Image: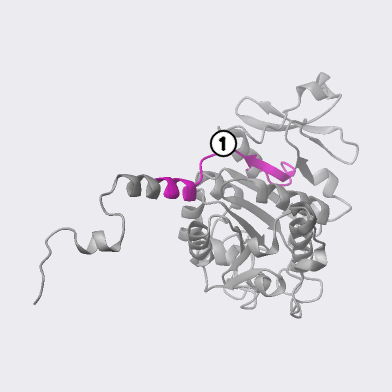
Amino acid sequence: MTNTQLIQYSLKDFKSDQEVRWCPGCGDHAVLSSVQKALSELGIPKEKFAFISGIGCSSRFPYYMNTYGFHGIHGRASAIASGVKIANPDLSVWQITGDGDALAIGGNHFIHTVRRNIDINIILFNNEIYGLTKGQYSPTSNKGLVTKTSPFGTLEEPFSVGELVIGAKGKFFARTVDTNVSLSTSIYIEAAKHKGTSVVEVLQNCVIFNNGIHDVVTDKEVRDDRTIILKHGEPMNFGKDNRSGLILDGFKIKVVRIGGNNITEKDLLVHNAHESNPGIHYMLASMRYPEYPVALGIIRAVPWPTYETAVGAQINDIQKNSEIKNMDDLLNSGSVWEVE
């Protein structure tokens, strides 16, 4: 039997025997299904997967995966996932986190994981609220949002996940919608193949405490005109009739209509996810409705050396040039004496 035959899986192979205890209608269910589908298509042995989480509704994820898993403490998933990957470079490590877990108490761990480019896959569920603790505003909540901890409206400017990732020297950033299983699955597959930290923001719906927060761009009646799915090497056009597009007007992205002002498809920006200069990627990640469509798909995917590879090379180099080869060498080095 060939190795390929040994590692053919179906989605069901990645389902655990645990009851899924998310609220009915929660976007987490669709994310779970997309991830399980993606893993079944990667051709990687199940024992090579490890799912790490912090605290929050999304962080129950490891219980529902038939893989190795670790449920950590609030905000520390990035630190744990980093350690797992560095100690076990052959593992496919996935960090499951939310906008509160990753960007509030875990913000410092998150940005440094991205900066170091450790080869882990981070799925960040963004429902713009604290769901598990019953509806407090989060770092991504819109300014002015009324919640239990902001009864007169939040006064803070929200984080943009894409801006934060790219600003932290991130080399892979993608965005998807919880209910778009096909798009999500394809993104998770590419994230797994990317060598380095991949961050996938999921616009996820909390049906209890922030229901419909993303509907303005994700509702099926308007999504074609208010989102753009970026594909590497293809023109940036969108809309129900596919006649709207993006061009670069000076230093800004501009929405245009094909056919208006002599605009043709050849005038549109062509997406280059592999461009090392983050300028265009930053602008794409920052686009907001109503001025722009919200960018979905893989926005940035730049090859770059990974941290754990550099750590391994450094250790090998030190060991090769060191006079100390084992514990006996260490114990007998420096100033030693015998006790009689």
Residue 279, quarter of picture = top right
Vertical order, 246 against 17 (above or below): above
**Residue, x 71% and y 41% (percent of image)?**
291
Q: Secondary structure at mark 1?
A: loop
- Note whether residue 115 is visible: no
Q: Position of residue 306 (x, y in %)?
A: 51, 45
Left or right of 179? Residue 168 is left
Left or right of 184? Residue 338 is left
Vertical order, 146 against 162 (above or below): below
Q: Position of residue 86 (x, y in %)?
A: 48, 57
Left or right of 145? Residue 313 is left
Report the residue that reaches farthest toward the front: 340
Question: Residue 113 versus residue 51: which sits nearer the camera?
Answer: 51
Q: Which residues are magenta?
A: 286-313
Q: Position of residue 115 (x, y in %)?
A: 48, 48
Please check the rendered image and state whether residue 293 is part of the magenta-colored stretch, yes or no.
yes
| Pointer 1 residue | 278
The amino acid type of the residue labelled 1 equals: Pro
Q: Residues within 10 Å of mark 1 (few under 14, many from 20)?
A: some
- Note whether residue 294 is visible: yes
Please check the rendered image and state whether residue 247 is part of the magenta-colored stretch, yes or no.
no
**Residue, x 61% and y 52% (percent of image)?**
199
Q: Quadrant of the C terminus?
A: bottom left
